[in-house]
Image (tube, grey):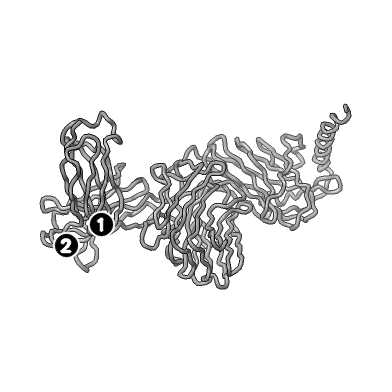
Amino acid sequence: MGDDKSSPCANLIFKKFFILFLVLSSIFSQVFAQKISLVQYPDEVVKGEKFAVKLDIYTEPEDKIFIIASIDGEVSLHEFLLLEDSIFNVELVKLNQFFIPKNHFPNGFFAQKTFIFADTFVHSSALRSYALVMSARTIGEIKIKFLPVKLYLDSLIYDAVGVGKGQLTIKVKSSVEKTAGLCAKFEKEGFIKFNMNEKFTAKNGFTLSFWIKTTLMKGKMITFKSGIDKSFMIVGLKSGNIFFSINNSIGKYEVVLPKFVSDGKWHNIIIGQSDNFLRFYIDGERIDEVLIPNLSQFEINRPSVRVENVLIDEIVLLKGGEAGIVERLSRYFVKADTEVIFLLKFENETVNISGNVSGVESSGVKFVPSSAPICSPEVKISAQLKDNNIIINWEVEDPSFIDRFVVERKVRDELFQPVYQIFPSEQKRYTFVDATAENNAVYYYRVKRVNRNGSIEFSDEVKIGMGLKRDFEIIGNFPNPFNSETRIIYNLFNDTYVKLTVYDIVGREIAILVDGFQSAGRHEISFNLGNVKSNEITSGIYFYKLQTQRGYEIRKMIVIK
């Protein structure tokens, strides 16, 4: 019994001494080339956040090698993974802080910390891929040097000439420089699920766009699945690379994109389909194009959509696969229009889904600030008539990346002309009063947003003027007076942006009941005092203001407590 208990310990000691012997024996070894073919890594990271470095090494399949990583900078190493044939292999043995004669290796190779990893497996190809997942503990720079060392005839041999290819420098920032709203972070087994209420078909083309940030190496991210005919479409990760898979009557196809995206950095992924071609973009750059025969016949009957695993921001599925949409999708939040099948956002710490969808479910989802390098939502614009003047109001979520606003105006079929320019401040709301507009004319206005990176975005157009009728009618609020709840009823003559706000008698904002686009027709909105802080509501007169793109109207209501 005593021998049985001591055996594992004895084996461990023997293995350590054996590997130490092999390291020391490298002093007497001959040079043999182990070539580093590629190192992929983020240029900069945020202190404390995980990031990953992918290392590709060319060697013979039967070779047994060490990988020595010399790291200059304070880091925490979380995982070291071996990626082979697009699937996970066993995790490598990790041996830290062995004594190695530094004068035997290239000058300047060793730094503050050295990690040694043993890969003693027989591989199916000559190219091996590894991923190191780590985080930085201090700001400044991290410098990493890799040295692959072959285990040969009880000795180690390395290629000193190839060391330069395995050197990299990563800048470490103290914090995120800007945020673009919120994004979704999935806890263990967390997901968002909903149903599309129409058949998804590739007949007219489609475009799928989303932003991801992860160090996950394997897993599904977005799944479209039909419960009727077992057809599916999957976007996920294999060995830290994006894979795309479809399966139905046209066959089963899978594409793995040749770019590592699991480095802990935000990436924009766009998959566009037109005719029988699939085009893949990462960060606005076309990575691959694949011809799939009969792809236009692919369809899923009212699929369910499931999102999971990675840190993800703004997912949009659109009809059509034109290349011109790539520039807009890879830079800006998407404007929901008639071509959007669904748009998934994360605002006000909720799952917001636009489109013809139903049955929204979510579990294990946290909402965290997003540092995705996308601009804030587009300019929200409205117009109103007051004292024979036209007042243009607009607002943005984040003015920090904007260089200037330009208000443009046109009459009938003329071209838009600039009438006002203003440079942004820290405020989010801006106003322009057009006193030059003629009383009986009808005008169109829009706001051009010129960003600091030189890009330009336009707001929606608003139509207004003394010759234009309003696009709504307030019926009233019932009951009035009221002591707990009242219903505000109004008609919209067109689909339009609506903002319904409650104010007290001195003009303080009490509640925003509606702030978004609504369809034409009758609407009833409840105002419940139970949803407002009790110390803000007393008996007396209050006002509600209904505003659309063509004007506004204010009505009075009375509270009796």
**Residue occupying the far top of the picture:** 2
Q: Residues within 10 Å of mark 2 (few under 14, many from 20)?
A: some
| Rendering coords of residue 157 (x, y %) | 80, 48
Q: Is residue 104 above or below residue 470?
A: above
Circle 1: residue type? Gly
- Residue denoted by label 1: 521
Between 285 and 215, which is closer to the camera in this rendering?
215
Toward the viewer: 213 or 154?
213
Q: In the image, 64: left or right of 396?
A: right
* Label 1 residue SS: strand
Q: Is residue 389 left or right of residue 528?
A: left
In which quadrant will I find the N terminus?
A: top right
**Mark earlier in primary sequence (1, 2):** 2
Foreground disc of the pair 1, 2: 1
Q: Is residue 81 above or below residue 282?
A: above
Q: Position of residue 151 (x, y in %)?
A: 81, 47
Residue at image location 53% in from the left, 66% down from the top: 278
268 and 17: which one is in front? 268
Report the disc number at residue 442: 2
**Quadrant in the picture for the C terminus:** top left
Number of residues whose C-alpha sits closer than 10 Å to that of mark 1, classed few (under 14), some (14–19) or many (20 or more): few
In the image, 361: left or right of 135?
A: left
Task: Kindly identify which numbered label has been placed on residue 108.
Answer: none
